[in-house]
Structure formats: structure tokens, C-alpha cells
Image (cartoon, rainbow, N blue to C red):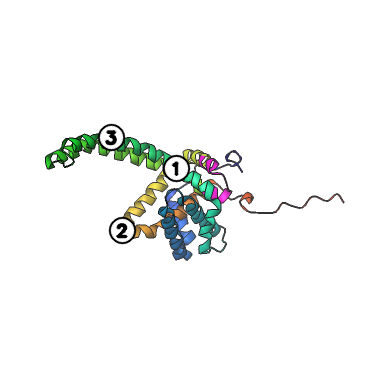
Amino acid sequence: MTAEQTDFRVGVIQPVECIKEGWALIKDQYWLFFGISIVGILIGGAVPIVLIGPMMAGIFLCLFQRQRNQPVEFGLLFKGFDHFVPGLIVALLKAIPIFLVMVPYLIIWFATMMPLLIRSGGQPSQPELQQLVYSMFGFEMIFFVIIMVVSISVEIFFMFAFPLVADRNLSGLDAVKLSFKAGKANFGGMLGLLLLNALLSFVGVLCCFVGAYFVLPISFASHAVAYRRVFPETTENFLVPPPPPASWA
């Protein structure tokens, strides 16, 4: 299946409802999905970009299995490696915008620091460091705003890429293209969902930081709910054998 052959819905994402439905989806098996989410993120973060793709695909495979009211086993997480190459391509493409923002920042930072270190012989004085901090403060604030805008945009436009790889077996490039189109068409709802999940994570952080991990399965589940609203279930998602040829008798 290609991106051009796949339709999607518009205006169907209600952030609060997605959170509620996400919780309802996993609450009976919360600890299973907690383990799936934590292990997936830990393995994916062990070798960033390389492993995050198959782990995200595996997490969504588990959630889609649950949406179909089919049994979910922990080992299903590792079926994400069946989509290793598409997941890797999605992860690489997702990293590019952040990389393009970070490079100018690092160049400016080193261009500012190096002359000071050279003049001071590698040991700048306290007044020199304070002057540098004050001069960089405005730049840091501008960069912070830019990185936040870019990060939110990347999440919105790539939100459906890993689910599309897992659910509809699209190639990495086709999944990104279709996710970008669906994200653009559902921008408001997806932005609201991201901000609401960010708020829940912040509340979790306030609960001795560990609370953010307990919110993680709900966040993934809400994304799966949003995905299924935008991309309804189709028979092409299953390995259904073709019907027998018609009889001429």
C-alpha cells in the first residue's frame, strides 16, 4: 500500500476524549502496557534512532491488538523489529529538523566561547564568564523558543508515521508523507492532544519525577486512539486470504 492509496479523516481528534478513550483502552491491563512502554523506551533510547523505530512500532502493534479486542502479550513488542527498516527511516527523517536547528546553535556557541578561551588561556575569569552568560542569555531564550516550535511541529507531523508503519505496513518514506498530510489537516486537534499529554507529564514530574513514567502508557494509548480516528480500521490491515475464484458452474 502506498501513501496515495490511503485516505484519512479530518476534524475527528478531540484531545480530552482521546485521553479518556486511551485510559479506557488500557486500564484493565495497565501494568502490562506500563511494562511495554517502559521497556520499549529504554531499548529505543539505548541506541537512539537505530532502535527507537522498531520499539515504537512494537508499542503501537500492542495497542492496535488491544483495540481489536485480541490478546496482548509482552513479546508482541518485539514484533516491531519486523518493521526495522521503515522504522529506521522514519526515525532518521524525524531527527533531521532537530539536527538542522542544533547545528547553527552549536556553531554560534563555539564561535562565542572559543575567542574567550583563547584570550584567557583556557581559564576565563569570573567577570568574563558572567559577561558571557549575560550576552548569551537573549540568544538562549530565542533558541529555546525556536527549538520548542520545531519540536512541537515535528511531533505533530510525525505523530502518525510509526503507527502507519506498524498498522498499514507502509514504507518509511510513505509513512512520513502521509503522516505529514494527516498532521497538517488535523493540526488543531493534534496540537491540543500534544499539549494535554505534556501537561499530564508535567503533573507526573511534580510527583517526584517518576509520575511521568506512569503517564507514558496513557499518552501512547491516546495517540493510538487519535490515529484510529484519523485512519479507520480496514480489512487491508489483516492478512486475509483472497476469496476463491468464482465458479462457472
Label 2 is placed on what type of residue? Phe
What is the secondary structure assignment of the residue under circle 2? loop
Report the residue marked by disc 3.
Answer: 108
Q: Magenta segment: does it hold 168?
A: yes
Crowd around label 2: few <14 · some 14–19 · many ≥20 (10 Å): few
Q: Quadrant of residue 67?
A: bottom right
Please report the bounds of the magenta region as a residue range.
163-176
Residue 237 drawn above or below residue 38: above
* Quadrant where the image shows the N terminus: top right
Say if residue 128 shows up in the picture.
Answer: yes
Upstream in sequence: badge 2 or badge 3: 3
Tell me what residue is drawn at x 61 percent, y 49 percent.
234
- The answer to whether marks 2 and 1 mark residues whose Cβ atoms lie closer than 8 Å is no
Percent of width and height locating residue 247: 83, 51
Q: Magenta segment: does it hold 75?
A: no
Label 3 is placed on what type of residue? Ile
